[in-house]
Image: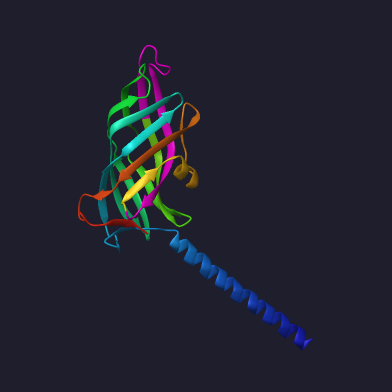
Amino acid sequence: MMRTMRTKATAVGAALAALAVLCAMFVATSASAAPAWKFESKSLEGTEVVLGGASDSELNVPGLTTKCEDFLYKLTVENASGTGKGSLTEMPLYNCTTNSSACSVGKIGAEKLPWASKLTTVSTTPYIIIEGVKVGIFYAGEECVLGETLVTVTGSAGGSIDNTAETATFNKTTLSASGTELKALSQKIEWSGLFPTEAFQWHREQALSVS
């Protein structure tokens, strides 16, 4: 009887030890999955303003591809409880055209700013998630399939971050990998863009990274 009790106690002790190891592993995994904004490899303290302009950016709504020569953004970033967060406060769009000679972009603009953002990790790659996206596009043209139509793009978008190039890439693959999506006219749409990142206030010309 005594031997049985000792055997049970040993088994319980081993189970508790295994549980402690698993908990430690979970905590370590959770910590590694919470990347932070860094400058010169040091975690950001306080806030910083990051600016950039997209290159090769296009938005594919049903029937039309829209491009903007000037696709700018202003993002205020910080680390809260060790995790990188941000607030996209400005996103001016200028000189926008479509891939159809029958359609022009009458008006286009970001709505309901600011949009919240956060950093996360997908596999081993750092990502930025932009939430609460809302962009209104008014297309014009008598023969345009969407002429005199206000198209509203909503949803969230995830982009992978390249620390070496200091860029964020958004495309069909990154949106899928991050579990985000954008919709317009009740349909899922595609958006792609390459966004350089550069500090504008206290950390100008310092290397920006996420880890």
Report the predominant secondary structure element of the magenta stretch.
strand
Residue placed farthest to the top in the image? 142
Left or right placement of residue 141 versus residue 62 in this view: left
Give the residue drawn at x 37%, y 32%.
135
Q: Decide if residue 2 is on the left or right side of residue 116.
A: right
Quarter that holds the C terminus: bottom left
Residue 26 placed where, x, y %?
Answer: 52, 65
Q: Nearer the viewer, residue 73 or 56?
A: 56
Q: Residue 170 versus residue 51: which sits nearer the camera?
A: 170
For residue 140, what is the image quadrant? top left
Q: Residue at x 40, y 27 (%)?
A: 65
Rendered residue at 52%/68% (across/down): 25
Q: Which quarter of the picture shows residue 107? A: top left
Q: In this rendering, would 112 be left or right of 187? A: left
- The image shows residue 112 at horizontal and vertical percentages of 35, 35
Screen quadrant of the N terminus: bottom right
Looking at the image, is 119 positioned above or below residue 170?
below
State which region is magenta. 136-164
Placement of 116 over or under 6, stated as above or below: above
- Residue 14 part of the magenta-drawn span: no
Q: In the image, what residue occupies the spot 41% across and 19% down?
A: 146
Q: How many marks?
A: 0
Question: Who is closer to the viewer here, 198 or 88?
Answer: 198
Position in image of residue 47 (x %, y %)? 26, 54
